[in-house]
Image (tube, rainbow, N blue to C red):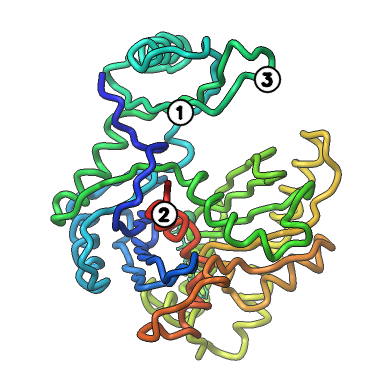
Amino acid sequence: MALDFDIFKPKAQPLFGMDISSSSIKMVELVDAGKGAIRVERYVIEPLPKEAVVDGSIANLEAVEETVGRGWKKLATRTKNVAMALPTAAVITKKIIVPAGLREEELELQVETEANQYIPFALEEVNLDFQVVGPAPSSPEEVEVLIAASRKERVEDRVAVVQAAGLKALVMDVESYAMQAAFDLIKKQFPNDAKDQNIALVDVGANVMNITVLRNEQPVYTREQAFGGNQLTQDIMRQYGMSHEEAEAAKRSGGLPETYDAEVLRPFIENAALEIQRAMQFFFTSTQFNSIEHILLFGGSAAIPGLEEAVSTRTQVNTLIANPFASMAVNPRIQLKKLIADAPSLMIACGLAMRRFDT
Ligand SMILES: Nc1ncnc2c1ncn2[C@@H]1O[C@H](COP(=O)(O)OP(=O)(O)OP(=O)(O)O)[C@@H](O)[C@H]1O
Ligand SMILES: [Mg+2]
């Protein structure tokens, strides 16, 4: 069996990050700007046709291939190497304990044996990857190994679409890890680097809202629900008799009738804030914790004007919108204002682009 999942292997090769999500494909290329500094070199957000990606699965290979190709041309980079991610729900992870000092082949065998016990598919049907995390907490003679497994077809679909566009899938990561890599760039903005604090990472996308609470770099809670900016788009379509495209454009650029604010936008925002408050209550009742120190909003819908304020008012928690590029230099070709507006939706693509600097 091939252990070719590549979540954990260091890369340090020129590559760019590619986030394939339901509304668009986002590409971000970061480069070394010297003296430990990173520069945002280029990025692209290329919209996907409806239903091309559904629930994190590629439903329309051709449409996604085309979009990847078009996006890459617009990106205008020389590198063809791509770091991608699988949806978190498509990956099973588990920590196991094995004796220390095993040879690579022995370790692989051990991982396969263990994986066999908890993966609900035949091993021929999965891609497996593993990484030795460190000494086991219980005994110095043992080490902790993190295993990640995913259905082969989930990996292969993503590899296929980039290959069809003439590109090379160099890294296959997991969205939750990429998100954490991007959060690492942001955590300096929190007091004491967010140490011993519960930070709610709230991703409001087009169709899905994901809430992950991180504490000392470990996810202590995660919850996903069907809620997102598409609901607002649909409200606009219904209220003003617009097409999907018209409503999407109007949502961003304004120019909607006067009734929009009170009758459409406000109720959506209040609803979103309420959903976030509910998720927090679930977090409190299902864990030992009873506080959240900060809320970090991201995903394309984080940019909806008024959302940040509504969330902070309703939850009484300090809320901010994520900008993973805040500490980076920016290529002068990129419009700074546009980058800041797009930044919340580029979290995962940015986290993937960071794989270039793995050592
Ligand atoms: N400037 C903006 N103002 C308002 N809404 C925006 C803006 N930019 C993007 N959006 C909305 O954000 C959503 C897309 O966000 P994002 O790219 O994070 O979603 P996605 O990851 O593709 O979707 P999902 O996570 O649900 O699969 C769309 O509903 C889009 O209309
Ligand atoms: Mg998303």
Q: Quadrant of the N terminus?
A: top left
Along the line of sight, the residue nearer the viewer: 278 or 11: 11
**Numbered disc 3: secondary structure:** loop
Q: Nearer the viewer, mark 2 or mark 1?
A: 2
- Quarter of the view holding residue 150: top left
Mark 3 residue crowding within 10 angstroms, few (<14) / some (14–19) / many (20+):
few
Q: Please state which amino acid type lies under the numbered disc 2.
A: Phe
Label 2 vs label 1: CA separation?
18 Å
Identify the disc placed on residue 243. none
Tell me which residue sits at (41%, 8%) in the image: 113
Q: Is residue 26 left or right of residue 200?
A: left
Q: Is residue 114 left or right of residue 63?
A: right
**Numbered disc 1: secondary structure:** strand
Q: Are marks 2 and 1 in contact (CB under 8 Å)?
A: no
Question: Mark 3 near ligand 2 (CB under 8 Å)?
Answer: no
Q: Please state which amino acid type lies under the numbered disc 3.
A: Pro
Examine the rendered structure and indicate whether residue 226 appears above or below residue 139: below
Label 3 vs label 2: CA separation?
29 Å
| Residue tagged 2 | 357
Q: Is residue 68 left or right of residue 191?
A: left
Q: Please state which amino acid type lies under the numbered disc 1.
A: Gln
Tell me which residue sits at (55%, 89%) in the image: 257
N-term mark: 3 or 2: 3
Mark 2 residue crowding within 10 angstroms, few (<14) / some (14–19) / many (20+):
some
**Numbered disc 2: secondary structure:** helix
| Residue tagged 3 | 137
Identify the disc placed on residue 131. 1
Examine the rendered structure and indicate whether residue 34 appears above or below residue 143: below
N-term mark: 1 or 3: 1
N-term mark: 2 or 1: 1
